[in-house]
């Protein structure tokens, strides 16, 4: 049985899935002073998001294929 999706990770991956984001924007937007709130690490460790260098743009955060599949399985109904 699959464990339920972490709502914060789901929010984070959905936000990045809307459009590739500059990594600096990701860090600034999802910054926290709580060392226990490791949203980037949680999503990256699950292979849902990656950082990649894009020529002329810089480092960009994108959702992986595994992340897209996970979103399809866990996305909330609107």
Image: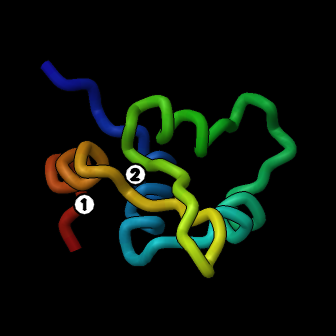
Residue 6, given in percent of the width and then of the height, sits at 42, 39
Q: Nearer the viewer, residue 71 or 5?
A: 71
Residue 68, given in percent of the width and then of the height, sits at 24, 55
Residue 3, given in percent of the width and then of the height, sits at 26, 25
Kindly indicate the quadrant of the structure image that contains residue 70.
Answer: top left
Residue occupied by mark 2: 10
Which quarter of the image is occupied by the N terminus?
A: top left
Residue occupied by mark 1: 76
**Relative to 71, residue 26 above or below:** below
Q: Nearer the viewer, residue 41 or 4?
A: 41
Upstream in sequence: badge 1 or badge 2: 2
**SS for callout 1:** loop
Q: Which mark is residue 34?
A: none
Q: Would you call the spot at circle 2 few (<14 residues within 10 Å), some (14-19), or many (20 or more)?
A: some
In the image, taking residue 4 as reference, residue 24 lies left or right, namely right
**Relative to 13, residue 6 above or below:** above
The label nearer to you, 1 versus 2, is 2
Residue located at (42% from left, 56% from top)? 13
Residue located at (54% from left, 53% from top)? 51
Which quarter of the image is occupied by the C terminus?
A: bottom left
- In the rendered structure, are the residues bearing label 1 and label 2 in contact, judged by CB atoms less than 8 Å apart? yes
- Residue at the far top in the pictured view: 1
Q: Nearer the viewer, residue 74 or 51?
A: 51
- Residue at the far right in the pictured view: 33
**Relative to 14, residue 72 above or below:** above
In the image, taking residue 20 as reference, residue 72 lies left or right, namely left
- Residue at the far front in the pictured view: 55
Disc 1/disc 2 C-alpha distance (Å):
9 Å
**Relative to 42, residue 2 above or below:** above
Residue located at (24% from left, 57% from top)? 75
């Amino acid at each position: 049985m699959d464990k339920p999706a972490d709502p914060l990770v789901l929010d984070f991956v959905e936000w990045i899935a809307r459009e590739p984001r500059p990594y600096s924007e990701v860090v600034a937007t999802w910054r926290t002073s709580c060392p226990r709130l490791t949203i980037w690490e949680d999503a990256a460790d699950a292979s849902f998001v990656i950082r990649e260098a894009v020529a002329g743009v810089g480092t960009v955060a994108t959702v992986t294929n595994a992340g897209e599949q996970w979103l399809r399985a866990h996305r909330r109904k609107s």
